[in-house]
Image (tube, grey):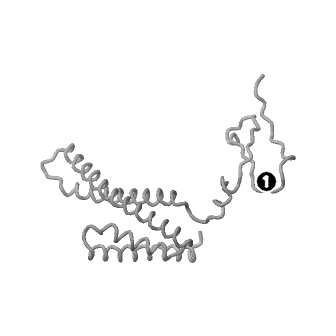
């Protein structure tokens, strides 16, 4: 006997449960005669209730996000810089294959270098910011700025104390500007 899809029985569902759910028919655009409906939630679901109270990403999500964004942005910028370097290094006697090879080698090499550097910076920033949130038990601008300061200083620590201090100051200022810009955008740009 073939499978006969039935509409779900909504009479047994509680009012609260049905308020947070919507009906979904995956076949609605296919014009099929089936009436298979799924009762999907309209709000995020959490395994533990404590997770629903947190208004920020977990440390693992933070680590993955900042490392990935750093690597992607660095690799893109590095590839653009390598492309420009590859185009400048083309000689008039080069064949088309050599020209393409110079451009690809320049883009790939510089993209990897800068992408890895920015990914490591994102990794350090995420670790320091999550550590600050755990220690202070609050999530505010101070955590982000101190994490930026620490990231810059830690990244350039091998170059000496002066370089570490300058890099730390730059990191703190950049993060401070980024956080301020984000708050200004939230306040004045209707999205």
Residue 71 found in image quarter:
bottom left
> Residue 106: x and y, percent?
24, 53
Q: Residue furthest right?
A: 11
At which x and y percent is residue 68? 43, 56
Q: Quadrant of residue 149?
A: bottom left
Taking 98 as reference, is 46 left or right?
right
Instruction: Left or right? Give the position of 137 relative to 118.
Output: right
Q: Position of residue 74 (x, y in %)?
A: 36, 59
| 157 on left or right of 126 | left
Which residue is depicted at the point 79% across and 53% down?
Answer: 17
In the image, is residue 37 above or below residue 182? above
Residue drawn at the location 40% of the way across and 75% of the way down: 172
Residue density around tag 1, few if under 14, some if 14–19, many if 20 or more, within 10 Å:
few
- Helix, strand or loop at label 1? It is helix
66 sits to left or right of 157: right
Q: Quadrant of the C terminus?
A: bottom right
Residue of label 1: 17
Q: Residue at x 55, y 61 (%)?
A: 57
- Residue 187, x across and y down, in percent: 57, 77
Picture quadrant of residue 124: bottom left
Considering the image in quadrants, where does the N terminus appear? Answer: top right
| Residue located at (32% from left, 73% from top) | 167
**As rendered, which of 25 and 75 lies closer to the eye?**
75
In this view, the residue in front, 40 or 119, is 119
- What number of labels is visible? 1
């Amino acid at each position: 006997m073939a499978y006969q899809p039935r509409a779900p029985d909504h009479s047994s569902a509680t009012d609260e449960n049905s308020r947070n759910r919507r009906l979904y028919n995956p076949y609605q655009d296919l014009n099929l005669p089936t009436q298979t409906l799924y009762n999907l939630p309209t709000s995020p679901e959490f395994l533990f209730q404590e997770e629903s109270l947190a208004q920020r990403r977990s440390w693992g999500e933070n680590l993955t996000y900042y490392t990935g964004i750093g690597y992607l942005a660095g690799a893109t910028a590095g590839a653009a810089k390598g492309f420009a370097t590859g185009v400048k290094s083309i000689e008039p006697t080069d064949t088309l294959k050599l020209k393409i090879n110079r451009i690809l080698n320049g883009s790939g090499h510089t993209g990897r270098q800068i992408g890895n550097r920015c990914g490591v910076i994102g990794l350090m920033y995420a670790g320091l910011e999550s550590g600050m949130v755990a220690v202070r038990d609050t999530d505010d601008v101070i955590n982000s700025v101190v994490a930026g300061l620490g990231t810059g200083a830690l990244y350039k620590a091998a170059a000496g104390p002066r370089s570490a201090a300058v890099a730390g100051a730059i990191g703190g200022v950049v993060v401070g500007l980024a956080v301020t810009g984000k708050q200004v955008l939230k306040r004045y740009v209707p999205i």
